[in-house]
Image: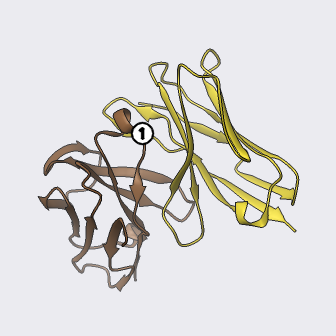
Amino acid sequence: GENVEQHPSTLSVQEGDSAVIKCTYSDSASNYFPWYKQELGKGPQLIIDIRSNVGEKKDQRIAVTLNKTAKHFSLHITETQPEDSAVYFCAPPAAGNKLTFGGGTRVLVKP
Amino acid sequence: DTAVSQTPKYLVTQMGNDKSIKCEQNLGHDTMYWYKQDSKKFLKIMFSYNNKELIINETVPNRFSPKSPDKAHLNLHINSLELGDSAVYFCASSRRGVANTGELFFGEGSRLTVL
């Protein structure tokens, strides 16, 4: 099955700084790379995704970059704000039509 | 209108009891899921149904039995509850299988505490 590792497990940044989370996966057949954000007391929500024919995708302050050769993809958050504080999950799909979630990264943005 | 709704939101019960969690989605999606999130936030898939048919059944004890009466509903029944069943259970749906559409829509979770 898919082996997914996410680093760091916790990340504390000052408001306005950037945050980067890296996700490493093992299944070379993976072709879809999403990031989910889970706020306190809520379910995870898709915030950005990328497919294997694209190297980078940006949506306002968030971006995802993909390195298929090295089998990792990263979430970049620029100009962080307190509402970015949450747990972030990468979830590359594994065989059998299911997403395999990373262990999560708890991001704390300090005002 | 809530897209994926699950009830109850909180459930506190004694070991050995049987309990159910219900889930409904109004997105017209074909596929529904149950995920378990433990205290360390690890999210693991338990089951997936596509149009009422079971398509994913991870290594989950037989005490857990999902039921999908129609494609908009997926319920989870748990027999003989154990302390280790304490977790947050999330229902989710997707338009087709996740490998096709990618996006999972999650409910707000049902926090189960077994005493």
Chain identity for the colour yellow used in the image? A
Q: Residue A14, percent across and down?
A: 89, 59
Q: Residue B24, percent across and down?
A: 26, 67
* Residue at 64% over, 41% down: A6
Determine the residue located farthest toward the top in the rendered image: A69
Closer to the camera in the image, B107 or A7:
B107
Residue corresponding to mark 1: B102
Report the side of B64 relative to B94 (left or right). left
Pointer 1 local density, CA inside 10 Å: few below 14, some 14–19, many at least 20: many
Q: Is residue B39 above or below residue A93?
A: below
Q: Disc 1 is attached to a residue of which chain?
A: B
Report the side of B11 relative to A82 (left or right). left
In which quadrant of the rendered view does residue B14 lie? Answer: bottom left
Q: Residue A29, percent across and down?
A: 44, 19
Q: Residue A50, percent across and down?
A: 55, 32
Colour for chain B in the figure: brown
Closer to the camera in the image, B14 or A8:
A8
Under mark 1, the amino acid is: Gly
